[in-house]
Structures are given as C-alpha cells and as structure tokens.
Image (cartoon, rainbow, N blue to C red):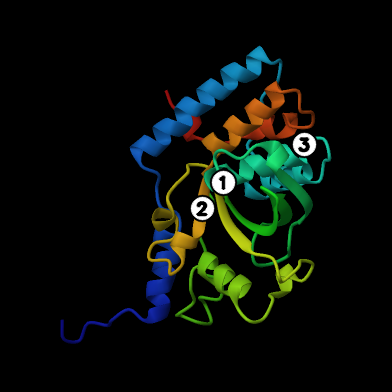
C-alpha cells in the first residue's frame, strides 16, 4: 500500500530467525517422540538403567556424544549411531572414528572416521528439541545464509575453514544433522541452498543403534541412553 513501510532485508531475516528458525514439530513428529520415549523407558527398565531426572539442553548432550566418541569402549557404536540417518545398514566394525572434537565455531562436532574402509570427515550439527536454526552474521549481513549452507560452502570451498584446521583437507566430507524430532532439512532450514547435501539422523534412529550396541555388550553407552530424551516436553504427553 502507498506509504506503508516495507520490511528491510534485516527484518525479514530476523523474522525468519525468530519465527521459522524453530519450526514447530508436526503432530506425527511429536507422537513419534512420545512413542519412542515410552519404548526407550521400557527398555531401560528391563536393562536396569535409570533415566536422568533433569532436562538436558543441546550443549550438555553434545558433550556426552563427544565423550562417547572419545571413549575407546564405545566410539565405534556412537559413530555408527550418528551416521544411521546416512548409512542405516552400517555396522560398528565398519565405522572406526580416529578423532573427534567440538570446534569453537562452525558446527557442533567434527569427526575423522573410517567408514566401510574409506577415511572421511563427518561434520555434525546438533538440534535438540527446542534448539533453533541459525543464520550466523544476519545482524550485520541481511543476506546471511543458514548455518548449514555456510558450513557446507566452507567445508567444500578452496580455503579450509578455521574450525576444520585439525583435519585432513584431502578427505571427503559428510554432513549430518542430529535432530531430536528427525525433521527433514527443509523443515529445519527452509529454502536452504544445500539441504540435499545433509542427512538427518533422528533421536529415534540414534537411540535404536545405542540400544542395539548396548545389547551386544558394548560398554560406555549408559550416559547417552539415560539422557537421550531428558527434557523433551513432547515425550511427557499423555
């Protein structure tokens, strides 16, 4: 309308960050979390594992994932669980992590692993139940891309990003989002330029692998199993 102020690019980006950044899970996604948590609890009772009583946010759970990747007893199992959205038939003996770290910027985890006999890098972005999606730098640059787009372009460009300086730039890179609900990329990052390059691993997939590995006698997985759904409001629904 004449005289009506149009939103700036910054306003549009900010609206996206505040509104679409955390896309509400669908009813089916909520139900999946509720049902899987119920099944997970029943399995834990059968295996004498006590669920953590307090909510865990994204960072503490990411720290437990990293601890699992650095534990020789369960590193292959945790790596297999993270990759289950990309390679569902992968066995733990086919997934051998050599190193893992939590960079100060970029993504949540960077892993060097041997998968099916090939060395590769795996970058992991973690989204727990209430974690928003980001477009870093949007306040200064209204055209900033989603975090996953920035990560993909940095990891596949001519200049190795600072947050991957500890890795071999000659290795192929795989991209994983670990998401509590298992939302597809277009729901997590609407309009993302490189959404098709990212695989999504849901907590349901992640937990299924952890339970399987624990059942095979793998030690060191209890901290992840006990906290997987801690703090999910959807899993408490009746």
Percent from the top left, x then y, of residue 89?
A: 56, 38
Q: Measured along the vertical axis of the image, is residue 191 above or below residue 208?
A: below
Q: Measured along the vertical axis of the image, is residue 138 above or below residue 37?
A: below
Q: Relative to the observer, which residue lies in front, 33 or 219?
A: 219
Q: Secondary structure at mark 2?
A: strand
Q: Which residue is mark 3?
A: 74
Percent from the top left, x then y, of residue 107?
A: 64, 62
Q: Quadrant of the N terminus?
A: bottom left
Q: Which residue is mark 1?
A: 128
Task: Identify the residue shown where x is 68% and y is 48%.
Answer: 62
Q: Which of the two discs, 2 and 1, labels the residue nearer the N terminus?
A: 1
CA gap, disc 2 and disc 1? 16 Å
Q: Quadrant of residue 136?
A: bottom right
Percent from the top left, x then y, of residue 96?
A: 75, 46
Q: Which residue is mark 2?
A: 199
CA gap, disc 3 and disc 2? 22 Å
């Amino acid at each position: 309308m004449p005289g009506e102020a149009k939103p700036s690019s910054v306003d549009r980006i900010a609206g996206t960050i505040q509104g679409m950044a955390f896309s509400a899970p669908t009813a089916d996604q909520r139900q999946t979390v509720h049902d899987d948590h119920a099944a997970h609890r029943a399995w834990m009772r059968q295996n004498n594992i006590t669920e953590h009583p307090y909510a865990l946010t994204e960072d503490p759970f990411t720290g437990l994932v990293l601890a699992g990747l650095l534990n020789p007893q369960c590193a292959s199992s945790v790596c297999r669980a993270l990759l289950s959205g990309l390679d569902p038939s992968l066995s733990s003996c086919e997934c051998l992590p050599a190193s893992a770290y939590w960079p100060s910027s970029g993504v949540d985890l960077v892993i060097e692993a041997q998968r099916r006999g090939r060395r590769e890098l795996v970058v992991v972005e973690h989204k727990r139940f209430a974690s928003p999606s980001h477009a870093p730098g949007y306040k200064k640059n209204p055209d900033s891309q989603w975090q996953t787009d920035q990560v993909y372009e940095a990891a596949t460009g001519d200049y190795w990003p600072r947050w991957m300086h500890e890795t071999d730039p000659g290795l192929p890179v795989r991209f994983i989002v670990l998401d509590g609900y298992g939302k597809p990329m277009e729901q997590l990052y609407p309009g993302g330029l490189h959404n098709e390059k990212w695989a999504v691993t849901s907590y349901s997939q992640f937990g299924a692998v952890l339970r399987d590995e624990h059942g095979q006698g793998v030690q060191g997985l209890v901290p992840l199993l006990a906290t997987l759904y801690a703090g999910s409001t959807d899993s408490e629904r009746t």
